[in-house]
Image (spheres, helix red, strand yellow):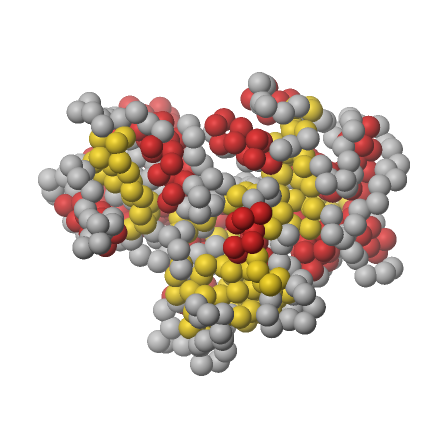
Amino acid sequence: MSVPATIHDLLARTVGAHPDLSAVSDQETRLSYAELADRVDAVAHELVRLGVRAEDRIGVYVPRGVGAVVTVLGVLRAGAAYVPIDVGYPKRRRERMVQAGRLRLLLADPDTARRAAGSPVEVAELDWRVLAPAPAPAVHVDPRSAACVLFTSGSTGRPKGVVLEHRHMVAFAEDAVLPAVGPGDRMAQASNLSFDTFTFELLRSMAGGAELVVMPAFADLLGADLRRQLRRYRITVMLAPAIALNHVARHDREAFASLRVLCSGGDVLLADTCRELREGGFDGDLLNLYGPTEATVACTAQRVRNPPEDCTRVPIGHPTASARLYVLDDRLAPASSGELYVGGAAVGRGYLDQPGHTAQRFIADPFAADGSRMYATGDRVRTGPDGALEYLGRVDDQVKISGHRVEPAEVERALYEHPQVREAAVAAAGEDGGLRLVAFVIPAADEFSPARLRAFLTERLPAAYVPAEIVALDAMPLDANGKRDWARLREVAEDRSRRRRAYEPPRTATERYLVRLWEELLRVESIGVRDDFFGLGGHSLLAARGRMCIRRDLQTDLPPEVVFENSVVEDLAKAIDQVRSDPAGTADAARRGGARGRSLHTP
């Protein structure tokens, strides 16, 4: 068979070589590659019948599972581009994506179709399981046809849709620098469809003939004993968020020991994490990947064996086979330290309907003779002694929160929509690998309520965009030039984190245990019994880690909601003590034990 030019070519090649191998599975369904291709053709045939044409954008608003994979590939086989919309997004966010994407259709299952009622686009309820077999539609898909639109945060405060073409995604799927995945491998599918990690999971497994295994979301895996789950699903290959690896390695360094390949990305990977993983028995390929969505998932890779003792953060590494990397100064001249630019076969088309922003970030590659473009990442890097690139930070204000790219301007825009907000500023505080978002607000009225403001933001923004802390100020600090004094704002955040509420020491053994645990998880000193887990910067991944530690150290298994409903030290201690005294009624006992729940802070 000829070299694949489109994503469907990749599938056809694997079907020809391994028709009977398992292609994708979840807890209810398993499809072989031949069965997957038949289902994909049926979906594509139905979409063409509904009038879908080349370059149409089709929203995929379905939960993770075999059905999501069939739907995505069916959209591509019909010649259209898929636009993944996370089923967990608030209604306002979903509608903005629908409008910005100018969708032709929004595909949904029966449950999400009800939630999408009233959407500003036609909603098509599609059940792939009951579609009659149909031949593949006679549709020509060009390698330069759009394959997907992935939304990321934009410098204007509005989400930007990154358009990737078939040729870009095929180049990534076939990249020889990334670890080979083949028959017999089981690739974990633990990310949501809107995150470009899904692209890695789907394309790399499909191109190599591996099985894509749909598992619980990563945060749920942490709370359900990750090590056990990976063995239960017999996973051999996984791409895990760096922030999650950093968390897990400190408390269960053997969790990933059964894997053959472990890739990390999305945030700073700590060298200590890699050492812990190796000491825990992981002897497979360990890679730190870096890449913006605009360059198709990953454009650098760093293989990690045993980091040098003086290494604290793993480099982002060397270029993949489909990427050309340039470190340039402000005049676009090569430099040892500067902004990273990416050229090569995986650089995307640009931003949907935003020619101005596309022209700013996707510029002519002066080092290539083929007329191609390079992408300005906005990331500062330097070249290490061995040629590996080291990540230094952002050129602009964009930050990574729990592995998600967040533009503070977008959060500020949402804050200004609230009638009680007169002025707002949003910044990241904390350390690499554990940043939290802090919103500074000058209230427009005396009755300002952080709780109501948080509820307002939760209805409009994804969870990673909702600030971990909301700080009310009398005036915005300014620097000598009359601009916001960002250094002073971050000092305010750190000072508040240090002071918090009046300190009250732990009184019981359980309270003392929780204080020690929270101080370790949150990297905060002098936690008192009235301090709130989420108010100190906690989030769902840390809460899951906490439950894992409590189960290990206290032999007490807490339902997930108990931690969220009892996020103050003394409340959670009472809940734990009640469960230990009444193990048969775990959930009810925990709810009786806690004094109060918390709705103010973001999980």
Q: Is residue 367 above or below residue 56?
A: below
* Front residue of 21 and 295: 295
Which image quadrant is residue 136 in?
top right
| Residue 423 placement (x, y as % from top left) | 26, 36
| Residue 19 placement (x, y as % from top left) | 83, 49
Relative horizontal placement of residue 215, taking residue 11 as reference (left or right): left
Determine the residue positioned at 44% across, 56% down.
267
Q: Residue furthest bottom?
A: 385
Which image quadrant is residue 568 in?
top left
Determine the residue positioned at 33% across, 32% down.
416
Quadrant showing the N terminus: bottom right
| Residue 207 placement (x, y as % from top left) | 73, 56
* Front residue of 52 and 511: 52
Relative horizontal placement of residue 422, taking residue 151 as reference (left or right): left
Asked if residue 533 can be seen in this view, the reply is no
Q: Is residue 590 above or below residue 229?
A: above
| Residue 253 placement (x, y as % from top left) | 43, 59
Quadrant showing the C terminus: top left
Q: Is residue 278 above or below residue 571?
A: below
Determine the residue positioned at 20% across, 42% down.
476
Asked if residue 397 can be seen in this view, the reply is yes
Determine the residue positioned at 68% across, 56% down.
168
Relative horizontal placement of residue 561, taking residue 535 as reference (left or right): right
* Front residue of 215 and 484: 484
Q: Is residue 418 above or below residue 249?
A: above
